[in-house]
Amino acid sequence: MENTIRNNNKERRLGYNEIMIVSMYFNDINDFINLELGVKRFQGNMERFHFNPIPLSDYSRKFFPNIETFNLYDLMDRVFKDGRIIKRELWYTVSYSIHIEEKEKGNICKNIEYTKQDRKKYGNTIPPEVKSLESECFYFASGLKTIDIPTRISEIGDRCFCGCASLKSINIPITITKLGNICFDGCASLTSITIPSSVNEIGNYCFDGCASLTSINIPSSVSKIGKLCFYSCCSLTSIDIPTLVSEIGDECFFGCASLKSINIPTSVSKIEGECFRECTSLKSIDIPSSVSKIENGCFYNCKSLTSINIPSTITSFGSYCFYNCGCIEELKQNKRIPEKCFKDVRG
């Protein structure tokens, strides 16, 4: 192993502090042993550690005799209480309740998750040291009206606020990168929401049933919008799809009865089945030339739709995709569109 570095054509020997920092990133006890066997002046390197940089076994424990802080990197790691150990640091995810217990013992938890049981025990205010929210953390918390999410949290889990029928406002910090599946499903009182520019993915069914949602800003950072994402958002009047999005999922805007306009960028190459079904207030839409197929039931019962641009790139039309549309007579004049597009042939 090299024990020198070159800087401005001069050699500088790695010192004890530098090699200790480097060896903290070793993955196996053999790396530590080989270092001391290969470079004599680094003998005793392991004895200088006051914490274990890797999980330890009965064999490897003896090489780190001066540990004062014992690190547990995984729930299944071997626990040692001998020698000079005075506290533990837990790096794996633990509940907030476990964190409180460990804190009382003088131990430290690095990754704290607020769970559904924590919420029932400690309330709806998320403690600042929490780094993640468990799936279903606020599941059907019927009395929840508003909530602030701490900036340490990077992801809102699946079904996290599902069924929070009284939730009217929520603060989503710029640390959030993903809104999980069914995240706000059934939040019937939520009127508006601002998604920060840090978010790049909106999960399936995310805002399904948010009947009071009138406006939503989807930032340009979002590249994926899940299926049924805005299903039955019957108060939503307009929406812009970001230019990074390539697909609009199945039934994404199904039942958005107040939706009057939508901007579909040229980045979109696929509009899934029944995407705009029952968008009864939708008056016009431009399908970009990047799209090659209109799937089954895509504009089913869009009875206010009087203007639609169908580019020449569309080579395939799904069944009942224009059933009961306001512009049906005009569409029938387009010989490229088959008869199956105008009939309800389901079942």
Image: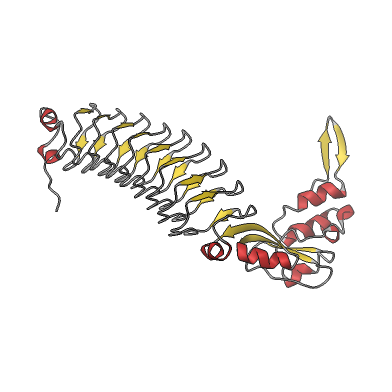
Compared across the picture, whether 114 is left or right of 240 comes to right
Q: Is residue 218 left or right of residue 46?
A: left
Residue drawn at (37%, 42%), measured in percent from left and top?
A: 213
**Closest to the observer: 268 or 305?**
305
Query: Where the C terminus falls, by quadrant?
Result: bottom left
- Residue 110 percent coordinates (x, y): 67, 57
Q: Position of residue 196 (x, y in %)?
A: 51, 38
Taking the image as shown, residue 13 lies to the left or right of residue 286, namely right
Res. 222 image quadrant: top left
Viewer-nearest residue: 129 or 148: 148
Residue toward you, 12 or 114 = 114
Left or right of 248 in this view: 112: right
Expressed as whole percent of the image width and height from the top left, the position of residue 187 reads: 40, 51
Q: Residue at x 42, y 48 (%)?
A: 203
Colouring used for the render: secondary structure
Q: Is residue 317 above or below residue 39?
A: above
Number of on-image labels: 0
Q: Is residue 297 above or below residue 55?
A: above
Residue positioned most to the right: 41
Estimate the x, y position of residue 204 in percent, counting from the top left: 38, 49
Q: Is residue 60 above or below residue 134?
A: below
**Relative to 114, does residue 301 appear above or below in the rendering?**
above
